[in-house]
């Protein structure tokens, strides 16, 4: 049976990935984004979707939906629409997608950021995030961090 820990394992398996030139590029980054023609796009949401897919929780249903959900705000909106959004005050689970307000160490500029929850320990969560300083990186956050907007709880088919 697939569970959130499978998503976390997928995320942790990518901790070695770095961008090729620091411009949202490289073979692995382009794989998350859906191909080389997508080179240069911010990729944290595409990374999170890839981890969910590898972990057995197909978040997006169609290719066009995948392309739209690579945007963090669109991904968060989809979580709300599907009733899978967990407010910041709720308890996160391993395998959730965590949403951050602002770029949170990702590329500069405007926008939001997201990552995969890989551990929950009391008031602390550990995340693996794509496009964190031009690489896949791991961080710790307090659950009451003002930058956390909420979580997307992926569903698994029985």
Image (spheres, helix red, strand yellow):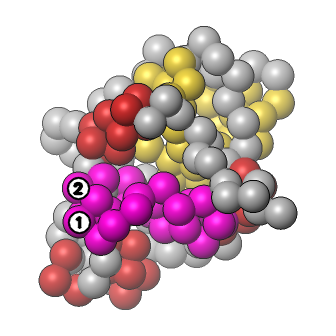
Q: Is residue 9 visible?
A: yes
SS under mark 2: helix
In the depicted view, which residue is nearer to us: 121 or 3? 3
- Above or below 149: residue 131: below
Magenta segment: 42-69
Q: In which quarter of the image is residue 18?
A: bottom left
Tell me residue 25's x, y (percent): 27, 77
The residue beneath circle 1 is 64
Do residues under tags 1 and 2 come within 8 Å of each other at their CB atoms? yes
Quadrant into which the N terminus falls: bottom right
Q: How crowded is mark 1: few (under 14 residues within 10 Å), some or many (20 or more)?
A: few
The residues bearing labels 1 and 2 have C-alpha atoms spaced at a distance of 6 Å
The residue beneath circle 2 is 68
- At which x and y percent is residue 86? 56, 25
Q: How crowded is mark 2: few (under 14 residues within 10 Å), some or many (20 or more)?
A: some
Horizontal side of 98 relative to 138 (left or right) equals left
**How far from the left and from the top, in percent, is residue 82?**
44, 36
Give the vertical position of 15 relative to 148 (above or below).
below
Measured along the vertical axis of the image, is residue 72 above or below residue 85?
Answer: below
The residue shown at (60%, 12%) is: 89
* Left or right of 60, for residue 95: right
In the picture shown, does residue 25 fall above or below 156? below
Left or right of 23 on screen, residue 19: right
For mark 1, give the secondary structure.
Answer: helix
The residue at 75%/58% (across/down) is 158
């Amino acid at each position: 049976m697939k569970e959130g820990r499978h998503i976390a394992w997928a995320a942790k398996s990518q901790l070695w990935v770095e961008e090729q030139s620091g411009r949202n590029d490289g073979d692995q980054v382009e794989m998350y984004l859906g191909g080389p023609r997508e080179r240069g796009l911010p990729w944290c949401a595409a990374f999170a979707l890839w981890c969910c897919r590898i972990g057995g929780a197909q978040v997006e249903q169609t290719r066009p939906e995948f392309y739209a959900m690579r945007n963090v705000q669109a991904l968060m909106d989809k979580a709300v629409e599907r009733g899978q959004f967990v407010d910041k005050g709720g308890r996160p689970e391993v395998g959730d997608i965590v949403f951050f307000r602002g770029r949170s160490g990702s590329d500069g500029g405007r926008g939001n950021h997201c990552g995969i929850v890989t551990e929950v320990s009391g008031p602390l969560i550990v995340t693996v995030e794509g496009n964190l300083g031009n690489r896949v990186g791991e961080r710790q956050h307090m659950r009451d961090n003002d930058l956390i907007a909420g979580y997307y709880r992926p569903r698994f088919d029985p």
